[in-house]
Image: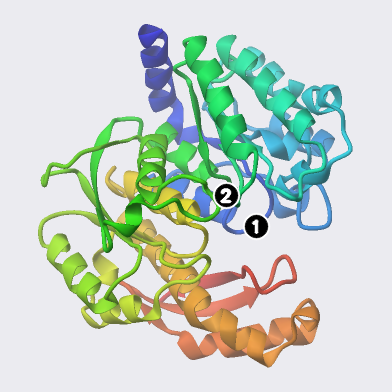
Amino acid sequence: MFRRTLLLSLLIAAQAGAQTLLPLDSRPATRVLPALIAGLGGGTPHVPPTVLLGNAGQEANPALLAAWLSTQPTDGPLIASLDALAYGGLVQSRRSPLTAAQALARLEPLREWHKRTGQPILAFITLPREPDATDRARNLDVARTMLDWAAAEDFAQLDITWDDALPGSPAPAEGAALAKEAADRGLTNVRVYPGADEVLSMLVARALAPQEKTVRVEYSDPKAALAVIKYEGIPLTQSAANHAAGSGFTVTEEANADLTLYVFNGGDPRKSALRISALLRRGPVAVADVEKVNLGNSRLWADLTTLRQHANLRALAAWGTPGNNLGSALAHAKLALNNPDPLRQDALLAREYANDVIYSTELRAALRKAVPEKELDTPQGQAELLRLAQNYFPLRIGNEYVLEDAALPWGRSFEWDFDLQAR
């Protein structure tokens, strides 16, 4: 089994430049961010146009996605969300009326692609959140069948993750049962852990930078890090370990680790900013701000910006759940340690700052104050977003960036999409 896994890793590494991505849905966090991470080395990943992917109200068309896949280059690996094909997206995976057999039939083009091209597939599938899931047994049956596909080497890597597990959710127990089954079957190409939106980025990191790196994780509040966190049902320390392994890192306590991941999970933000500044003098640092869900700590980032240290980070994340932030920061950092194109690295850091700091800590609240949520998906609402956003730019990281355009792609205030241009 070790020999098989090693050979798969070598094959992925040899072909990583021609990566094809099949995102979970059309949100910027699941489509744009993974593609930008994949492009850090200078290549151009192949990603479906937004119109082919699912959104809040419309599922992706599996036939069109399969047709798109059949036209893509076949000289590199495929990184795929199984929910996108099986159900039409993350939202639809919770409420789809399909039977397990129908969902599995939609996934067959992946096995056909693998047989036709001989290229590896790195895939992930989610266990849905409660109370939104309407047919948990169906989703679990499909996920369990994916273990069979992994055993048959249809997948070089299969990640089974669970989405937004609030207290009482059956997903952690379902995941534990699947993890035990995978271990009992000796499936070293299967990982099971909490996650969703960040997983494609993590698989991208493992495909494009398969060489193991070490990471030392430091918390602003080490005691609080031992507590079970919202949406995952596990301690923050375990979530960090899961996302580190999922991104291709080995966690270590050694001071000379390849990366330090500083996790802000509460406490004095000014003290944390000074600590991050000190860590940066020692080596590469990424920051995951997980103190609150979907909301960065404005004081932490203001102090880091005053110190001009935000520009020296390898990655930053503050946009989502703790797992979202840990996974996306680690995935970006893994590629940032792999000789990235310096202009693309600076541009991606600027995008993360604009999204995770500017939008999540200030701009979203200003937009909600100015425009009722039900009026956001109108020309007037979109225009107000752009007007308000211009107050926060230009933004300087290494280069200076101006905001060319901004929009609310799902017609809601939770996420925005935008165009930054260096000048």
Secondary element under disc 2, as helix, strand or loop, is loop
Question: Which picture quadrant has residue 223?
Answer: bottom left
Q: Residues within 10 Å of mark 2 (few under 14, many from 20)?
A: many
Mark 2 highlights which residue? 197
Q: Amino acid at mark 1?
A: Arg
At which x and y percent is residue 267?
29, 71
Foreground mark, 1 or 2, reads: 2
In the displayed structure image, the side of residue 338 where residue 62 appears, left or right: right
Residue shown at the point (70%, 48%) measured from the top left? 130
- Residue 37 visible, this angle: yes
- Pointer 1 with pointer 2, Cβ within 8 A: yes
Q: CA distance from mark 1 to mark 2?
A: 9 Å
Residue at the right extreme of this rendering: 97
State whether residue 227 is above or below residue 408. above
Residue at the front extreme of this rendering: 168
Residue 328 vs residue 161, the one in the foreground: 161
Q: Amino acid at mark 2?
A: Asp
* Quarter in which the N terminus is drawn: top left
Residue 405 vs residue 282, the one in the foreground: 282
At which x and y percent is residue 396?
34, 78
At which x and y percent is residue 122?
54, 28
Residue 326 vs residue 377, the one in the foreground: 326
In the displayed structure image, the side of residue 41 where residue 81 appears, left or right: right
State whether residue 217 is above or below residue 224. above
Mark 1 highlights which residue? 27
- Residue 157 visible, this angle: no
